[in-house]
Amino acid sequence: MSGHRLVCWLASVQCTHRLNARSIVACLVAANIVWSGVGIVRSSVSGLMIDLAIEDQNKLQKALEPYTESGVQYHALRTRNQRGVSLLSLHLLVPRRWTVQRGHRY
């Protein structure tokens, strides 16, 4: 149900004080379609990136360990392989006192 139809439907309910059962069912069906669509998009996006293997996580933790001692934090490590190329994604948090320039130096 589009936005202007929903507004018209709500206005007609206010004016006539009657609910049309078909309209209620249509709203429920529309909500179900939206909910299903969100679930499909969420699962397809999460399927693009998979969690790192344990040995790769250990290698990455060893590589990032010197930076964590200076206050850098990271989480959400994910990777995927595409045509023999490994792609890595992670969330990196630097201390608040760091400037952007210092963050880019690493």
Image (cartoon, rainbow, N blue to C red):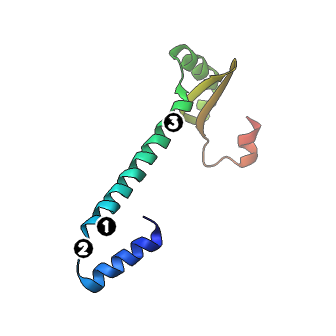
Mark 2 closeness class: few <14, some 14–19, many ≥20 residues within 10 Å: few
Please tell me whether mark 2 or mark 3 is closer to you in this view: 2
Q: Is residue 64 visible?
A: yes
Q: Residue furthest bottom?
A: 15
In the rendered image, residue 17, in percent from the top left (x then y), is placed at 23, 82
Q: Taking 38 as reference, is 11 left or right?
A: left
What residue does disc 3 label? Answer: 44
In the rendered image, residue 36, in percent from the top left (x then y), is placed at 40, 46
Q: Give, as a three-letter code, the residue at label 1.
A: Ser
For the point 55% across and 13% down, which residue is it? 55
Q: Give, as a three-letter code, the residue at label 3.
A: Ser
Q: Give, as a three-letter code, the residue at label 2.
A: Leu
Measure the alpha-carbon separation of dots 2 and 3: 38 Å
Mark 3 closeness class: few <14, some 14–19, many ≥20 residues within 10 Å: few
For the point 46% across and 69% down, which residue is it? 3
What residue does disc 1 label? Answer: 23
Element type where label 1 sits in the image: helix
Q: Residue furthest top?
A: 55
What residue does disc 2 label? Answer: 19
